[in-house]
Amino acid sequence: MTAIPTQAEPSRPASPAGSGRLSRLLRAHPADPAWARPALAALLVLTALLYLAGLDRNGWGNEFYAAAVQAGTKSWKAFLFGSVDSGNFITVDKPAGFLWVMELSARIFGVNYWSLLVPQALAGVATVGVLYTTVRRWFGPAAGLVAGAVMALAPVAALMFRFDDPDALLTLMITLAGYAMTRAIESGKTRWVALAGVFVGAGFLCKYMAAFMVLRFLLLSTRPTSQANVVNIW
């Protein structure tokens, strides 16, 4: 038996570990251009500045819900049911879910303007980030940045995420539901559909049936193109 010599492959210079981590940080997806991650970071920072600047000028925002937050810091029962007073005499006109984040913040940092309204502003920043991620998966980072910027600069969003109404957390939940359904369509896995349902359910705990307005579009998004003309059961 004759041995056939093989030529060793030329050794590749090892890249420093630090540069690999930096590359992964700046470019989350290999297909994304190098500017995508810094542009997203800039968008989120600018959104945070937009929503947090002069936040205390809004005072207590909706004083009715601010009273419920204060009650929730004094009684866990009031926290659970969304009571306006710590004696649980009457509850607010919405489910208690949207109050929980503000009440936890107020329990940690005390009841003040910032502890109530900063969680709302951060929900807005998170919504912009989730919307970017959802759009980027199908249309690229440039489209994702445009969608996120439109969301951040919409006058109704600037008002909603600087106030202590239930709409801020509701918007974040239904945006997360849209992202989960996008992943379900891509992967065909049931767990993403179930997660979308969890987010819609969390939205229901913020503002009742307002969260169900997206169900029609989430269900229509799962239809194959060939079934576009089937009878609309809605």
Image (cartoon, rainbow, N blue to C red):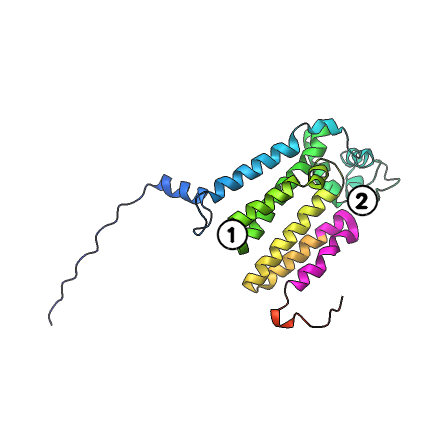
Image coordinates of residue 217 in percent, x first then y, are 69, 59
Q: Nearer the viewer, residue 183 or 57?
A: 57
Residue 113 falls in which quadrant of the image?
Answer: top right
Q: Determine whether the residue tagged by mark 2 lies in a helix, strand or loop.
A: helix
Q: Amino acid at mark 2?
A: Phe
The stretch of residues the image draws in magenta is: 202-221
Q: For mark 1, what is the residue?
A: 140
In the rendering, at what x and y percent does residue 89 appear? 89, 39
Residue 215 in sight in this render: yes
- Residue extending farthest to the left is 2
Placement of the C terminus among the 4 image quadrants: bottom right
The residues tagged by marks 2 and 1 sit, at their Cα atoms, a distance apart of: 43 Å
Tag of residue 98: none
Instruction: Determine the image quadrant of residue 80.
Output: top right
Q: Residue at x 13, y 66 (%)?
A: 4
Q: Secondary structure at mark 1?
A: loop
Q: Residue at x 16, y 61 (%)?
A: 6
Q: Toward the viewer: 103 or 183?
A: 183
Q: Which residue is mark 2?
A: 81
